[in-house]
Image (spheres, coloured by chain):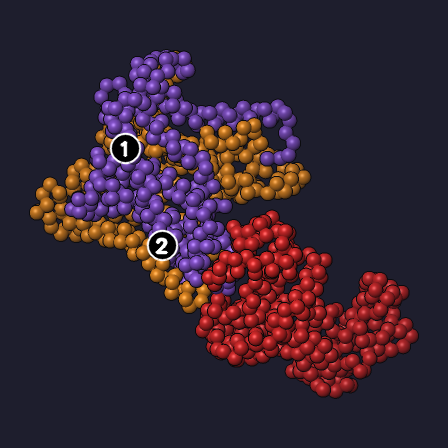
Chain colours: A red, B purple, C orange
């Protein structure tokens, strides 16, 4: 079992408050992603759960037991660090076996478990190598293997893919997803990349400057962001946010429309605009336009669109997908 | 300097570099050569460079007549012993400053370094009187204690810089893996820090071996290391250059070798990190 | 970042060093301060009395002290100039791609690892002896009278010995600083049309300025305490020609057994060193921030 609960957790470093009262519930078996811009506190939150930092106030419960004052080793969690944090002087076998050795298990039991974890991760051929002899992706797997072998209540991932190149990142994303399917253990995953968040999560926790902005499934956050911050954070390219008369006539201070939810016409439409730049990816076309009524607009069209800089176009948002926000930045329903 | 040089320039610079290096190194070379001469050859005019009767008699005499080995033994025991004990005290201190720093840690480190800048004569009188009254004069324990305290700030400082280079998340990973503090230090920290610890010891041994204030003033015969033994050649009897050379060669050889391996540590340690 | 457990452990682990260094430094210093206010001679210990600052006034007005102060400054400044300027030149030379660079480095650095008593005695006897020393032979071969180094030019002789010992240190530090100079900066300068002199003045010198400052400060700290070389060659003489402050204090303490006077001298030496240390600590402190 691996449910995790945070109650009014606060963390301050001296006078600087980094986490301002977070309440959170993570069910057993869930894949929860903490996401947010740099400095929002997501890594700190993860470390508070891990026990590597002490909370300033509040409680951390694991399986309904209060672990707030318990050290990291006794919480039964395993962490995969951003830099992998492998022991450079130990072989892959030694790295994976270390936790079991600390737990005092017998060497034949240890060997068996290490082999099993190595097999799961395709590391069997590398067991005797040292970390410096491994590629980035292999080191990543050893870090995961080290965590798996402890059979923890939950896995904690701290931006594990940010040190990998793009292709490897996609591959590892899939592998971690498959791992979750296979083990069904709770996983908490920290990233600043909202694409990772959207593709991997059962539940996303968006953090903004130490507080929880919104919690929900990926599609929840995509379709019904509860405020300007989440609206602007989830979705790439970013949602177009428009103030002024276009917003006022719809009864809002700000309206938002995602790039993929607007139509472009050369003849008629709500917002006249001029194309500044068109990016042709083949699968999509991203159009960056400037309009007097709305300011800069980014639009996404499927396939190839014959738009060139300088062209005059008309942009019309699809009302069904329009989001409205009041003067405090909150969603109007 | 700039990129391409003519062959003539390169040859010129090579010759210049070799001449300069040779001139700087020459006194050491000359000592080494003189150690194999007879005393008469040693003072011969014009001086004999390579063509003389090479003999080992000086090395034998330095041991037979003045018991060189005893002083060498003292040097070895003092340099290694004082710094091993210093290491036992410095490692925990450096650990705590690197991994559990407090608000005052930086100030503490600077204060410790400042004790190394205190001139020895500032405390010569009380230390000497204290040692006299405690019967520590001319004892290995007495001078060993002083040598240890002289190097302690340096040991702590250098170990601190090496420990700080160990990525913190590896130690956190060990903690998550269930390692107690002791296990963390034994299984992870120490193996990773061994090269740094070895380099630090190297520099410390060199500095203690060459220390020539307290060793001259606090020892006379029993605990005197090689620095004091060589100093006795300042008031010699009869011809002594060849013996001085032999004694000197023996005294400096180990350190020249160790010194070669410790250049980087020297820069790190003796500039207190201000030069990288 | 430490949790509560590691913070407490930390304090316990650092205590022995703090205590030992405190005892080593503060306690004797306080005692020296105390002794400096006494008229206390080991030859006549029962006749000691508190005399306030009298030791300081007599020490400071003693012509031997003025001489020692001047000698100390002359020694320090001379060795600094020779070792730093020489060090820069040697470092520039060593930075070039030269055949056998490793051996050259070994030769240039070696003197720093020679113990001071050996350095001094080898220079005094094998090299500078006016009858059978190597320099004497060179002089005579060139038709000059050999210089009677330690008798006629005692201070210069000591300066030469100490400079030889410290030139390698300066060279090594400055070479390290030089080698951190980017290849790309050199290339950019060459593209900009900089000749060797302006390259040195505008690019090299500012880059190693910090290293030069560090070398000067650190050497000063150690040069203020030169002792062994004087001890084995001139014993401060002739007269007080080569007596510096450390040697003067030593003389007062262990040759004249005048505890009061020696302590006053020691405190003055500490004050001098503190002035230099103040500046050095500023640089180190700045470095610790980073």
Residue in the picture at 58% in, 73% down: A209
**Which chain contains the residue that carries disc 2?**
B
Residue in the picture at 47% in, 31% down: C106
Specify whether C33 is left or right of B182: left
**With respect to residue A129, does B234 lie above or below?**
above
* Dot placed on the residue nearer the N-terminal end, 1 or 2: 1
**Which chain contains the residue that carries disc 1?**
B
Residue of label 2: B111
Specify whether A65 is left or right of C259: right
- Residue closest to the far front: A108
Question: Which is more foreground, mark 1 or mark 2?
Answer: 1
Specify whether A201 is left or right of B243: right
Tell me residue B16's x, y (percent): 52, 25
Q: Is residue C53 visible?
A: no
Tell me residue B50's x, y (percent): 41, 15
Specify whether A329 is left or right of C91: right
């Amino acid at each position: 079992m691996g449910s995790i609960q945070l109650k009014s957790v606060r963390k301050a470093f001296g006078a600087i408050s980094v986490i301002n009262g977070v309440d959170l519930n993570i069910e057993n078996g869930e894949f929860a992603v903490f996401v947010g811009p740099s400095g929002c506190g997501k890594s700190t939150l993860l470390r508070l759960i891990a026990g590597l930092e002490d909370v300033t106030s509040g409680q951390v419960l694991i399986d309904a037991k209060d672990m707030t004052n318990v050290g990291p080793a006794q919480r039964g969690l395993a962490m995969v660090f951003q830099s992998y944090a492998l022991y450079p002087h130990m072989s892959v076998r030694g790295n994976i076996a270390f936790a079991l050795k600390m737990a005092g298990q017998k060497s034949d039991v240890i060997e068996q478990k290490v082999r099993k974890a190595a097999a799961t991760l395709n590391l069997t051929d590398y067991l005797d190598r040292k970390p410096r002899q491994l590629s980035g992706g292999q080191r990543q797997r050893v870090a995961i293997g080290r965590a798996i072998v402890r059979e923890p209540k939950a896995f904690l991932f701290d931006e594990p893919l940010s040190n990998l190149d793009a292709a490897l990142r996609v591959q590892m994303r899939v592998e971690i997803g498959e791992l979750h399917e296979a083990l069904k253990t709770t996983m908490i995953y920290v990233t600043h990349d909202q694409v990772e968040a959207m593709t991997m999560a059962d539940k996303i926790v968006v953090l903004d400057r130490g507080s929880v902005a919104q919690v929900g499934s990926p599609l929840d956050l995509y379709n019904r962001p509860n405020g300007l911050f989440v609206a602007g954070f989830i979705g790439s390219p970013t949602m177009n946010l428009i103030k002024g008369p276009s917003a006022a006539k719809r009864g809002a201070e700000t309206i938002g429309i995602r790039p993929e939810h607007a139509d472009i016409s050369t003849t008629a439409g709500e917002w006249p605009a001029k194309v500044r730049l068109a990016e042709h990816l083949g699968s999509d076309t991203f159009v960056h336009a400037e309009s007097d009524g709305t300011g800069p607009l980014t639009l996404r069209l499927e396939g190839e669109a014959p738009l060139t800089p300088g062209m005059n176009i008309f942009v019309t948002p699809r009302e069904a997908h329009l989001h409205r926000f009041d003067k405090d930045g909150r969603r109007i329903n | 300097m700039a990129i391409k040089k003519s062959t003539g320039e390169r040859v010129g610079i090579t010759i210049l570099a070799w001449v300069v290096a040779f001139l700087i190194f020459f006194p050491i070379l000359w000592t080494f050569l003189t150690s194999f001469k007879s005393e008469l050859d040693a003072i011969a005019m014009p001086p004999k460079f390579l063509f003389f009767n090479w003999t080992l008699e000086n090395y034998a005499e330095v041991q037979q007549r003045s018991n060189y080995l005893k002083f060498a033994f003292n040097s070895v025991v003092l340099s290694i012993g004082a710094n091993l004990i210093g290491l036992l005290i410095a490692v925990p201190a450096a650990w705590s400053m690197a991994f559990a720093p407090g608000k005052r840690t930086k100030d503490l480190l600077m204060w410790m370094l400042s004790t190394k800048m205190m001139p020895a004569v500032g405390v010569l009188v009380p230390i000497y009187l204290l040692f006299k009254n405690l019967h520590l004069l001319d004892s290995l324990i007495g001078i060993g204690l002083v040598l240890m305290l002289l190097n302690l700030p340096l040991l702590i400082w250098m170990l601190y810089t090496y420990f700080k280079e160990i990525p913190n998340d590896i130690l956190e990973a060990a903690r998550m893996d269930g390692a107690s503090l002791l296990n963390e230090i034994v299984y992870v920290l120490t193996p990773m820090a061994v090269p740094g610890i070895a380099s630090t010891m190297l520099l410390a041994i060199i500095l203690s071996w060459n220390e020539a204030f307290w060793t001259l003033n606090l020892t006379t015969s029993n605990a005197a290391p090689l620095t004091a033994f060589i100093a006795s050649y300042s008031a010699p009897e009869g011809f002594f250059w060849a013996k001085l050379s032999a004694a000197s060669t023996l005294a400096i050889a180990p350190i020249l070798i160790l010194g070669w391996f410790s250049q980087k540590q020297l820069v790190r340690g003796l500039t207190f990190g201000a030069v990288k | 970042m430490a949790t509560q457990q590691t913070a407490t452990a930390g304090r316990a682990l650092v205590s022995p060093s703090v205590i030992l260094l405190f005892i080593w430094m503060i306690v004797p210093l306080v005692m020296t301060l105390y002794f400096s206010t006494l008229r206390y001679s080991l030859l006549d210990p029962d006749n000691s009395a508190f005399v306030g600052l009298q030791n300081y006034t007599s020490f400071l007005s003693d012509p031997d002290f003025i001489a020692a102060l001047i000698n100390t400054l002359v020694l320090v400044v001379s060795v600094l100039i020779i070792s730093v300027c020489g060090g820069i030149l040697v470092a520039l030379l060593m930075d070039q791609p030269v055949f056998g660079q490793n051996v050259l480095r070994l030769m240039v650095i070696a003197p720093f690892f020679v113990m001071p008593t050996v350095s001094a005695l080898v220079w005094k006897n094998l090299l500078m002896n006016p009858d059978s020393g190597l320099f004497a032979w060179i002089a005579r071969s060139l038709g000059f009278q050999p210089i009677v180094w330690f008798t006629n030019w005692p201070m210069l002789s000591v300066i030469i010995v100490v400079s030889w010992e410290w030139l390698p240190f300066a060279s090594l530090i400055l070479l390290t600083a030089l080698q951190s100079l980017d290849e790309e900066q050199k290339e950019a300068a060459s593209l900009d049309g900089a000749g060797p002199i302006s390259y040195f003045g505008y690019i090299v010198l500012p880059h190693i300025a910090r290293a030069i400052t560090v070398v000067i400060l650190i050497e000063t700290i150690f040069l203020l305490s030169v002792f062994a070389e004087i001890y084995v060659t001139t014993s401060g003489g002739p007269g007080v020609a080569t007596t510096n402050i450390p040697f003067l204090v030593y003389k007062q303490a262990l040759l004249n057994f005048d505890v009061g006077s020696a302590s006053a001298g020691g405190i003055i030496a500490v004050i001098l060193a503190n002035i230099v240390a103040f500046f050095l600590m500023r640089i180190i402190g700045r470095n610790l921030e980073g």
